[in-house]
Image: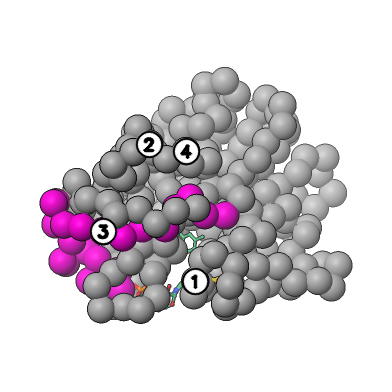
Amino acid sequence: MREVNAVVLENARIAEDIYSLTFACGEQIPVRAGQFCMVGIHGYPLRRPIAVCKAEGERITVCYRLKGKGTRTLAETYKPGEALSVLLPLGNGFRLGNEKKIAVVGGGVGVFPLVAAIREFAPERKVFAYMGFRNRAAVCMEYEMRRGERLVLCTDDGSAGKHATSVQAFMEDVEEIEPDAVLACGPVPMLRALKSATAGRNFPVYVSLEERMGCGIGACLVCVCNKKDGSRARVCKDGPVFEIGEVEL
Ligand SMILES: Cc1cc2nc3c(=O)[nH]c(=O)nc-3n(C[C@H](O)[C@H](O)[C@H](O)COP(=O)(O)OP(=O)(O)OC[C@H]3O[C@@H](n4cnc5c(N)ncnc54)[C@H](O)[C@@H]3O)c2cc1C
Ligand code: FES
């Protein structure tokens, strides 16, 4: 992990309430899919955690939804050329062995680390993507999501793609694709649905958690979650990726 004095290259709206921020780090920083960065925003003592979506040479792209004051300030005030202080790469990321067929199941802003997974794991492996959005206006990064073997785009209201959740769409295909592993990220209710739908299946499911964070580097314990064995884990340092049965959702 290092602190990078980056420069904003682009910070533009790509869907309803969603922005894509690309910054130049001045050097190439190796980043694994599922890792994240802590973005410093003027006026806020705490940096904001955002998953890395694309790492291309010295350029990093993250996508964020306008949520509270921090992300609104980020969208409104950081124009191309502006300095940006970023800590990266953080967290463990998705680590795979020799699995050949991967399913990625995402919902909401959880689709963004999975774009990085598709970029990293396709085309060497077959990647089947199930991506859920609120509605048509929220759909973005479709081009990136099509890099794999299959993309099933879903919306909650049926205004684009399949009228289903990404978990439902994945479970409709699961017998056909027989994945060797599943990578998932999204709101906790979605992860719970995935956990119960895949219970007893013979493939591992790895989830990336988006817990509230303070420091992002393992020091403040704001992000601690409970593990099934009774121990506790720091999502920022021990995660954010865990095997789905390892943590309490
Ligand atoms: C590992 C990780 C990866 C993430 N990746 C993305 C991403 O790719 N795109 C995206 O849109 N969002 C992502 N998030 C969520 C994002 O960090 C929050 O939406 C953002 O911090 C909200 O900041 P705010 O100031 O606008 O909101 P406020 O609610 O005003 O934030 C107040 C405080 O709460 C924290 N906070 C609030 N909501 C969350 C949340 N859901 N998760 C973590 N901290 C939160 C903030 O960091 C801040 O310290 C990720 C979170 C984590 C932990
Ligand atoms: S955010 Fe500080 S320990 Fe995880």
CB-based contact (under 8 Å), mark 2 and mark 4: yes
Instruction: Determine the residue positioned at 18% across, 61% down.
Output: 78
Label 1 C-beta lies within 8 Å of the nearest ligand 2 atom: yes
Q: Which residue is mark 1?
A: 215
Quarter of the image where one finds residue 248: bottom right
In x, y percent, where is residue 18?
29, 58
Residue 220 in view in this figure = yes
In x, y percent, where is residue 187?
54, 64
Is 85 covered by the magenta stretch? yes
CB-based contact (under 8 Å), mark 2 and mark 3: no
* C-alpha distance separating marks 2 and 4: 6 Å
Kind of element beneath mark 2:
loop
Q: Which residue is mark 4?
A: 30
* C-alpha distance separating marks 2 and 3: 16 Å
Q: Residue furthest top?
A: 124
| Closer to us: 91 or 1 | 1
Q: Which residue is mark 2?
A: 28
Label 3 C-beta lies within 8 Å of the nearest ligand 1 atom: no
Question: Above or below — where is 215 with respect to 19?
Answer: below
